[in-house]
Image: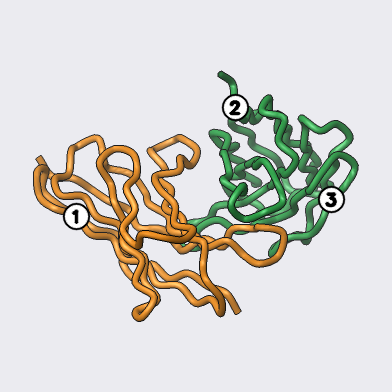
Amino acid sequence: NAGVTQTPKFRVLKTGQSMTLLCAQDMNHEYMYWYRQDPGMGLRLIHYSVGEGTTAKGEVPDGYNVSRLKKQNFLLGLESAAPSQTSVYFCASSTGITVAKNIQYFGAGTRLSVL
Amino acid sequence: AQSVTQPDIHITVSEGASLELRCNYSYGATPYLFWYVQSPGQGLQLLLKYFSGDTLVQGIKGFEAEFKRSQSSFNLRKPSVHWSDAAEYFCAVASNQGGKLIFGQGTELSVKP
């Protein structure tokens, strides 16, 4: 069972470079999320999607863009990377609208360093 | 505003000893609460959840948590810790906006032989 798969696992960028992180889930989940994890700050929500073709801003959206063209994929883009975006990025998905169905399943993470 | 606080950044316990990780939340209505565990280099795995009903909930790997409304707490416990329990633990509350999760800062657990 693949669950939630993130690619790549590691990446090093130079300031100003762009990249896209891919998240794929095979559980037919409606909701998908992108988080960043920084020491001492837990996980903070960047963007999320409640269904194919929809996206919404989370707690820390600046400097990131997302797209959900297919239900199973959720892309996170950095157009011009900055050192402040050095972090571990996690993707998650969940089944539905109600909180009771919102058990989130996480990918293994992408470790990004911006020099 | 909704928030979750985990007062302990790092805890060390001896293998076989009991464990309690603290979690306090701020939420106006009935909270939906979660504990997740993150092993080194891995993603987050759900340990247990509280939605309603019995305030003592059982999870995987021998963990349990007790919801105490009067104390706004949802502390995680395990009677006997194993070396494989060394990980980072996150408490979270579900937001009333689109079911988003609000995470605490995390507690890193180290286990001494």
Which subunit holds the residue at mark 3?
A
Give percent across and percent down for residue A29.
71, 36
Q: Mark 1 to mark 3: distance in Å?
A: 40 Å
SS state under label 2: loop
For the residue marked with disc 2, what is the amino acid? Gly
Mark 3 burial class by Cα count in 10 Å: few <14, some 14-19, many 20+ = some
Circle 2 chain:
A
Residue B19 tag number: 1
B80 or B52: which is nearer to us? B52
Nearest the viewer among B26 and A61 is: B26
Q: Position of residue A14 (x, y in %)?
A: 71, 42
Q: Earlier in the sequence, mark 2 or mark 3?
A: 2
- Residue at 27% x, 42% y is B86
Could one spot residue B55 in this view of the protein? yes
Residue A55: mark in rendering: 3
Q: Position of residue A20 (x, y in %)?
A: 78, 36
Which tint is chain A? green
The amino acid sitting under disc 3 is Thr
**Residue found at x 53% / y 76%:** B27
Is residue A17 shown left or right of residue A99?
Answer: right
Q: Are marks 1 and 3 in contact (CB under 8 Å)?
A: no
Residue B96 quadrant = bottom right
Residue A84 seen in render: no
> Tell me, what hue is chain B?
orange
Residue highlighted by disc 2: A3
